[in-house]
Image (tube, helix red, strand yellow):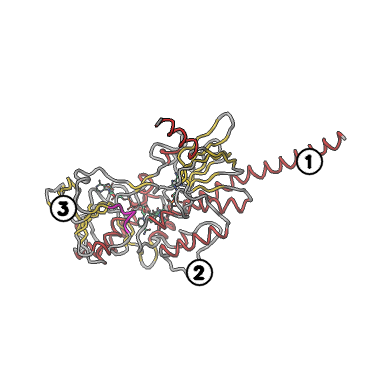
Amino acid sequence: MENLLRLVDHEEFFSRRCIWVNGPVIVGAGPSGLATAACLREQGVPFMVLEREDCIASLWQKRTYDRLKLHLPKQFCQLPKLPFPADFPEYPSKKQFIQYLESYATKFEINPRFNECVQFARYDETSGLWRVKTKTSASAEFEYICRWLVVATGENAECVVPDIDGLADFKGDVIHAADYKSGEKFRGKKVLVVGCGNSGMELSLDLCNYNASPSMVVRSSVHVLPRKICRKSTFELAVMLMKWLPLWLVDKLLLILAWLVLGNIAKYGLKRPAEGPLQLKNSKGKTPVLDIGALEKIRSGDIKVVPGIKKLNGFSVELVNGEEHDVDAVVLATGYRSNVPCWLQEGEFFSKNGFPKSPFPNGWKGNSGLYAVGFTRRGLSGASSDAIRIAQDIGHVWKQDTKQKKKTTTACHRRCISQF
Ligand SMILES: Cc1cc2nc3c(=O)[nH]c(=O)nc-3n(C[C@H](O)[C@H](O)[C@H](O)COP(=O)(O)OP(=O)(O)OC[C@H]3O[C@@H](n4cnc5c(N)ncnc54)[C@H](O)[C@@H]3O)c2cc1C
Ligand SMILES: NC(=O)C1=CN([C@@H]2O[C@H](COP(=O)(O)OP(=O)(O)OC[C@H]3O[C@@H](n4cnc5c(N)ncnc54)[C@H](OP(=O)(O)O)[C@@H]3O)[C@@H](O)[C@H]2O)C=CC1
Ligand SMILES: O=C(O)C(=O)Cc1c[nH]c2ccccc12
């Protein structure tokens, strides 16, 4: 009986609807998906965007802290075909960036299907088409059939939660950086911030601004660069130097300049990795920290730097150096990962870590109409150049096909007429 009921439920609520999509299906309505959709719109190619959340740019709208600003200058963060408004500051705030993305979606008439999470996608050899299965927040299922599949789910699709001894039994609050909004609820508290990437540094700084006492865990090493060198953005300087010099030399110069501006930061527990900052970004995807004020708080002792964690215990932490500290709350600024291996049934183009196997600049196009946008570890500017390439590639085939179709229709028409 129970099984029968289950079957009825299944029939009633989970019947799958099949939808043919004329043009590509784009999975994800973040900046990458929006940029690809806008470029396709310009090429006259129809598309469908599927988004698991109920809004565009969900990472920015729902999983980032209030005080966040873009950390690269605005000219490196705008999407194709629509510059930022002229009155935007050099480093737009999260609110301004979201406002820009909303107007971007409106301008290019991008209307994603929201609350639809892609659970499974595979290429069907027999038909030469992609089959994309989704589940809505109301548990309805859909299947989209299309010729092209654009993966735009991002490098930050899921939170990395490390396996720390005693974490599950820790008595205070534990949150991931993605759920941190502001230091308001941590006023006066001792907060252990695990991780020292841009998130760990900026959340520790935010905690100081709310009179909390952050201790930031640096278990290995980190590159900290000033955001500006001689009033020029460090990132812009690096981009300029890269036009003339090899990567290793640009790294050397950046490190010399960083030393001149910041001094020796190893004495605060911030050891530099053996690889240079850009080299490391390329090889391991580890973004250098662009300092917006955390370093000053580290120097003043407002942010304590501590080594790796041995284990958590009730309301305290034991560190690898044997020290024990009281802790009221833990913020895991331990990074993110791609979720592509969870839903894309494909083993050629994407590797097990959810990133395309071919490095930049070849990681945007796979076989059988598969594309990836925003996986080159080059932030928003990398996503923009992927989007332009993808839309050109699909647009080219689309136009040829349309011409071909017109020809066949005319020929057929003539044949029909001649038959009369
Ligand atoms: C805190 C923070 C700050 C950053 N600041 C900068 C910066 O200043 N400059 C810069 O260049 N880069 C920055 N980045 C890098 C960031 O990767 C880009 O800004 C940008 O968000 C990437 O866009 P995306 O569309 O590729 O991914 P996302 O913005 O993550 O969008 C992916 C979308 O796909 C959806 N999705 C995921 N899985 C599924 C599924 N199975 N089915 C349906 N939908 C799905 C998600 O809900 C999401 O809306 C920052 C990242 C973080 C975390
Ligand atoms: N203003 C902005 O524009 C901002 C941009 N960002 C971007 O978002 C992306 C993600 O950044 P972020 O969230 O900082 O993630 P990252 O992946 O850059 O950093 C993760 C950090 O967590 C540490 N970590 C992981 N596991 C453990 C563990 N078990 N114990 C101790 N430490 C651990 C890592 O250390 P280890 O290196 O030893 O593995 C590393 O320091 C980056 O591209 C970043 O630039 C983030 C915040 C602000
Ligand atoms: O902020 C991010 O996550 C980025 O990926 C932006 C970015 C791309 N390339 C870089 C090199 C140095 C610092 C930041 C970036």
- Residue 93 image-quadrant placement: bottom left
Viewer-closest of 2 and 119: 2
Mark 2 neighbour class, 10 Å CA radius: few under 14, some 14 to 19, many 20 or more: few
- The amino acid on which the numbered mark 3 sits, given as a three-letter code, is Phe
- Disc 2 or 1, which lies upstream in sequence? 2
Q: Which mark is residue 315?
A: 3
Point out the tag, 2 or 3, that comes first from the N-terminus: 2
Camera sees residue 262 = no
Residue 400 image-quadrant placement: top right
Query: Which quadrant of the figure contains the C terminus?
Result: top right
Q: In x, y percent, where is residue 227?
A: 35, 62
As drawn, which residue projects farthest toward the front? 1
Nearest the eye: 266 or 108: 108
Ligand 3 location (quadrant): bottom left
Return the residue at label 1. Answer: 410
| Of the two numbered discs 1 and 3 in the rendering, the one whose residue sits closer to the viewer | 3
Q: What is the secondary structure assignment of the residue under circle 2?
A: loop
